[in-house]
Image (cartoon, helix red, strand yellow):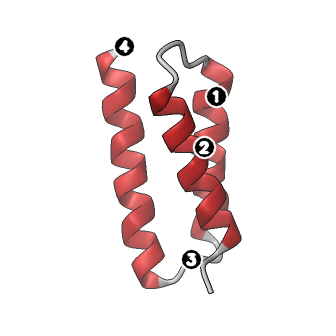
């Protein structure tokens, strides 16, 4: 069964990246969702969370 916190983090990052005018609040919410998901993540989910963090950082650099 997939970690609900992981799914929330994934959704938060996806929504923020797809929203061209993402706000600082959205960025912070995505970052917090990733941090929360790490606590219950399986090793595979941790790898995916690292990828989400990289996507978030890349998105922030493009702004």
The label shown at residue 41 is 3
Q: Secondary structure at mark 4?
A: loop
Instruction: Using the numbered discs, state the Cα–Cα distance from disc 4 to disc 2 in whole angstroms.
Output: 18 Å
Instruction: Using the numbered discs, state the Cα–Cα distance from disc 3 to disc 4 in whole angstroms.
Output: 29 Å
Dot 2 or dot 1, earlier in sequence? 2
Instruction: Pick the residue in front: 38 or 7.
Output: 7
Dot 3 or dot 4, earlier in sequence? 3
Instruction: Using the numbered discs, state the Cα–Cα distance from disc 2 to disc 1 in whole angstroms.
Output: 8 Å
Dot 4 or dot 2, earlier in sequence? 2
- Residue at 69% x, 69% y: name it: 4
Which is in the foreground here, disc 4 or disc 2? 2
Q: Position of residue 20 (x, y in %)?
A: 47, 16
Q: Position of residue 26 (x, y in %)?
A: 64, 28
Disc 3 vs disc 4: Cβ atoms closer than 8 Å? no
Q: Position of residue 6 (x, y in %)?
A: 59, 65
Residue denoted by label 1: 26
From this view, report whether residue 44 is shown above or below residue 25: below
- Residue at 54% x, 54% y: name it: 10
Residue denoted by label 2: 12
Disc 2 vs disc 3: Cβ atoms closer than 8 Å? no
Q: Residues within 10 Å of mark 2 (few under 14, many from 20)?
A: many
- Residue at 68% x, 24% y: name it: 25
- Residue at 62% x, 87% y: name it: 1
Q: Residues within 10 Å of mark 1 (few under 14, many from 20)?
A: some
Disc 2 vs disc 1: Cβ atoms closer than 8 Å? yes
Side (left or right) of 56 relative to 2: left
């Amino acid at each position: 069964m997939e970690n609900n916190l992981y799914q929330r983090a994934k959704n938060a990052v996806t929504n923020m990246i797809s929203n061209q005018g993402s706000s600082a609040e959205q960025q912070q919410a995505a970052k917090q969702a990733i941090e929360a998901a790490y606590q219950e993540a399986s090793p595979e989910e941790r790898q995916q969370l690292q990828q989400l963090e990289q996507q978030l950082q890349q998105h922030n650099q493009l702004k």
